[in-house]
Image: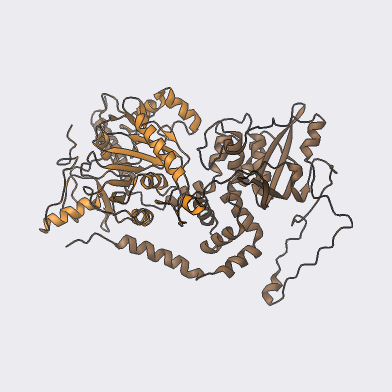
């Protein structure tokens, strides 16, 4: 046969993947364990964006992709979507969260107290270059307070609702499998409340920040005050087929409530996600705060920010432009050349017949 | 009775990767889209082990339709050996155990990005087109909820206006690929970014075409023997790319859609875009037997 039907493409893609993987070399359970232990905030971010809470799988995805975040999240999402939905856990009330950190910028002190918890907020951001000279970095031990802060605390918005400062959202009686699930049905607009919160929970951190920041800078109508920011652990309560309820363990969660004055009451924006990711929650809650009544096509309109902060979709579409586009390009060229030829023909004829 | 009799042995993944509930949803949405030709049906669109925008919509449809006997062909921009086509073909074969082929006539299911093969498809074949943007109204209305309402009202005035403005400004309709087309006299759809050359192949075609956008989560279909009419004014006829007279420098075939290859001397040469058609032409030329089927275009023209 004169013209062998090209297996070149398949060989090339196989080798290109090998080239990528060669740089990281092989890896084993120890490396996954090391990633999990040393990079908890990265693990949290990936678990949030994947909407899959499993530290080991998140660490595995990071190890397998060499830290290519979008790839890691896609790996986890593609794994997650094949898993059966066995149970819907019981709803979590705010005052049942085992709280590590909980602050409010709205009041100097709040019922339950300001609890700083773990944060780098007040750290001096100085690179520990001496580690590269051989020094080891040993953080100073934490000195426990005389009286530990309460592990369970009410929400600030509950106090505001009691004092007629805001109208709490109506309780949603939807239960179990009737709760809309974004991963099993399409997102349509106006979006169901559950879909909005789920979509923000698994949004890409950088994307939410970019649009949330735009809203904060003035492209939104509402200026956020951080009513409450919380890093906590939530108990996952599920029901055994025999009817007994039991705990399937705790997961790290973060949530933010931001408020702004809307007439005589406060408007409230809310977001929560798996893992501890404060930036994402504040930015997402700001978008939520701004979305009621936002102009169509503006960055704070629900359809705009929910579509454009979906990391798997946005990153995938962005890199798809690397794929060949010969056909579409050729089709455009054809129209351009023809239009140009027509124009040239027209101007020639008008040169000859100026009266026309 | 024991638990083991009620369950099946553990497997790393479901047949065809997608689980039963995902396939069921897709089947339902495919039936709906066949029932209302050209109307976009929203679906959940699961993540698959490939990046969004790389054929995940087409892939979900293919994975739902295949069984171990389905002979699958995958093309990208007309070519079977394009890297992403090779990757998708390998994936389907890996997770569904399907036989694969490059021959259009042998295929039961053809997943394609941006082309319809040059050989006429039969009633027993299904064409799955990958769709980056399912919304023909996007250029005039980027907001999807408003666009949805416009489809419901068959409010296509702005589409016509856009085409009219192009004619006024440039002397012709400037739409390259994805030429908006009216399906079954009701819904305007994008035929996906196939060239204008390929759109007439959908009109009253014998085969079923399913168009699926994974990232945008929309599925729509052109059932067999359905009208697909490009939006044109009665006095400005539809124009396909002027490729009818071009000759492929590798195979010598003339009268089909070509890839333009820029040359060092400032000129261009051309290669037939449907790579398997090129291969078949070369085989026939070299005396390896005739395997070419009947084509939609004859002598570079689409018979009316």
In this picture, residue A119 sits left or right of residue B136: right
Residue B193 locus on image (x, y percent): 35, 41
For image coordinates 71% across by 35% down, the residue present is: A268
Residue furthest to the bottom in view is A134
Q: Within the image, what quadrant is residue B137 found in? A: top left
- Chain coloured orange in this rendering: B
The image quarter in which residue B118 lies? top left
Q: What is chain A's hue in the picture?
A: brown
Image coordinates of residue B290 in percent, x first then y, are 12, 52
Residue at x 32%, y 25% (from the top left corner): B185
Rendered-image quadrant of the C terminus of chain B: top left
Residue B109 appears in view: yes
Q: Who is closer to the viewer here, A132 or A266? A: A266
Does residue B160 sit above or below B268 in this rendering?
above
Kindly give the residue lying farthest to the left in the view shown. Answer: B287
Q: Is residue A67 visible?
A: no
Q: Is residue A249 left or right of residue B156?
A: right
């Amino acid at each position: 046969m004169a013209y062998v039907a090209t297996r070149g493409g398949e060989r090339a893609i196989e080798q290109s993947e090998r080239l990528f993987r060669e740089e990281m070399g092989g890896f084993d359970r120890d490396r996954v364990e090391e990633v999990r232990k040393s990079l908890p905030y990265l693990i949290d971010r990936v678990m949030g964006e994947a909407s899959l809470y499993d530290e080991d799988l998140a660490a595995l995805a990071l190890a397998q992709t060499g830290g290519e975040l979008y790839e890691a999240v896609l790996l986890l999402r593609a794994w997650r979507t094949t898993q059966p939905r066995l149970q819907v856990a019981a709803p979590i009330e705010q005052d049942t969260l085992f709280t590590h950190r909980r602050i409010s910028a709205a009041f100097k002190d709040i019922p339950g107290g300001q609890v700083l918890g773990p944060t780098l907020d007040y750290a001096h951001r100085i690179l520990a270059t001496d580690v590269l000279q051989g020094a080891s970095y040993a953080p100073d031990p934490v000195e426990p307070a005389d009286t530990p802060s309460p592990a369970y605390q009410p929400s600030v918005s509950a106090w505001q609702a009691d004092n007629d400062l805001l109208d709490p959202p109506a309780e949603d009686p939807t239960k179990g499998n009737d709760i809309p699930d974004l991963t099993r049905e399409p997102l349509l607009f106006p979006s169901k409340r559950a879909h909005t919160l789920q979509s923000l929970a698994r949004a890409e951190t950088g994307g939410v920040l970019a649009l949330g920041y735009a809203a904060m800078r003035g492209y939104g109508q509402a200026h956020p005050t951080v009513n409450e920011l919380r890093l906590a652990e939530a108990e996952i309560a599920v029901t055994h087929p025999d009817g007994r309820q039991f705990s399937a363990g705790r997961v790290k969660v973060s949530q933010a409530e931001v408020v702004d004055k809307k007439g005589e009451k406060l408007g409230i924006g809310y977001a929560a996600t798996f893992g501890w990711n404060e930036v994402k929650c504040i930015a997402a809650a700001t978008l939520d705060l701004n979305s009621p009544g936002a102009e169509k096509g503006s960055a704070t309109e629900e359809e705009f920010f929910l579509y454009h902060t979906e990391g798997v979709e946005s990153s995938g579409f962005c890199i798809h432009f690397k794929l060949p586009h010969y056909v579409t390009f050729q089709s455009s060229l054809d129209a351009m050349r023809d239009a140009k030829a027509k124009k040239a023909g027209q101007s020639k004829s008008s040169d000859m017949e100026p009266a026309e | 009775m024991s638990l083991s009799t009620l369950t099946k042995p553990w497997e790393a993944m479901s047949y065809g990767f997608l689980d039963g509930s995902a396939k069921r949803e897709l089947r339902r949405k495919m039936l709906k889209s066949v029932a209302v030709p050209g109307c976009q049906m929203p679906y959940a669109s699961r993540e698959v082990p490939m990046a969004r925008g790389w054929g995940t919509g087409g892939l979900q449809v293919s994975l739902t339709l295949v069984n171990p006997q389905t002979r699958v062909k995958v093309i990208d921009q007309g070519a079977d050996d394009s890297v992403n086509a090779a990757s998708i073909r390998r994936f389907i074969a890996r997770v569904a155990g399907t036989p694969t082929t490059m021959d259009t006539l042998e295929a039961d299911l053809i997943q394609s990005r941006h082309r319809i093969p040059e050989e006429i498809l039969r009633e027993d074949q299904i064409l799955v087109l990958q769709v980056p943007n399912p919304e023909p109204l996007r250029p005039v209305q980027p907001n999807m909820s408003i666009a949805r309402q416009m489809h419901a009202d068959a409010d296509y005035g702005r589409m016509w206006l856009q085409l009219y403005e192009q004619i006024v400004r440039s002397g012709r309709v400037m739409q390259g690929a994805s030429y908006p087309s009216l399906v079954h006299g009701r819904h305007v759809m994008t035929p996906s970014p196939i060239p204008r050359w390929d759109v007439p192949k959908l009109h009253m075609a014998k085969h079923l075409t399913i168009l699926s956008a994974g990232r945008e989560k929309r599925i729509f279909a052109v059932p067999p023997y359905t009208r697909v009419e490009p939006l044109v004014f009665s006095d400005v006829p539809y124009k396909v790319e002027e490729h009818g007279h071009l000759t492929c420098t590798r195979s010598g075939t003339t009268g089909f859609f070509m890839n333009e290859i820029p040359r060092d001397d400032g000129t261009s040469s051309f290669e037939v875009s449907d790579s398997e058609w090129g291969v078949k032409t070369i085989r026939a030329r070299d005396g390896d037997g005739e395997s070419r089927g009947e084509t939609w275009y004859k002598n570079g023209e689409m018979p009316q």
